[in-house]
Amino acid sequence: MARVLSSDEAKSAITRIQEIINGGLADQIAALDGQGQLLSDPNNWDGPLAEQFRGSTWPETKSALDKAKTELEELQQQLQRIAQDIFTAGGAS
């Protein structure tokens, strides 16, 4: 039978990561996206640097933000499964 171990530190770390994700990290990513969209509008900001921002800086940054958000959602789901497995295995003491 496979060994199942869950220290109090591990349980606490799972909880802290979930709190960080739920406590605003995803909201901050969404806020960054909103501000980037605003700066990408030539009616709000235009000129050579604005064109560079719209053409390369923002698309690359938005892609990274979208990927980070997706990965955080996947991490959160995985942590929920891990926590459930710990409790199911009797590691909730």
Image: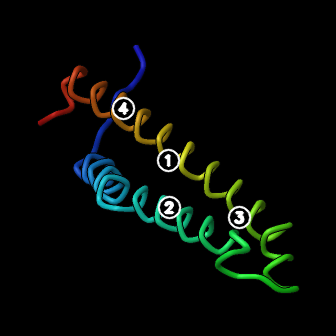
Mark nearest the camera among 3 and 4 is: 3
In the image, which disc is placed on residue 29? Answer: 2
Q: Residue at x 32, y 50 (%)?
A: 18
Per the image, the residue denoted by label 3 is 61
69, 17: nearer the viewer: 69
Q: Earlier in the sequence, mark 1 or mark 2?
A: 2
Quarter of the rendering occupied by the N terminus: top left
- The residue where tag 1 is placed is 72
Q: For the image shown, how many numbered marks are present on the structure?
A: 4
The amino acid pointed to by label 3 is Thr
Q: What is the secondary structure assignment of the residue under circle 3?
A: helix
Q: Residue furthest front?
A: 43
- Crowding at label 4, few (<14), some or many (≥20) Cα neighbours within 10 Å? some
For residue 1, above or below residue 90: above
Q: In the rendered structure, which disc, 1 or 4, sits on the residue that comes first in sequence?
A: 1
Residue depicted at 16% across the width and 34% down the height: 92
Mark 2 or mark 3: whose residue is earlier in sequence: 2
> In this image, 84 relative to 70: left or right?
left
Looking at marks 3 and 1 on the same chain, the residue that comes earlier in the sequence is marked by 3
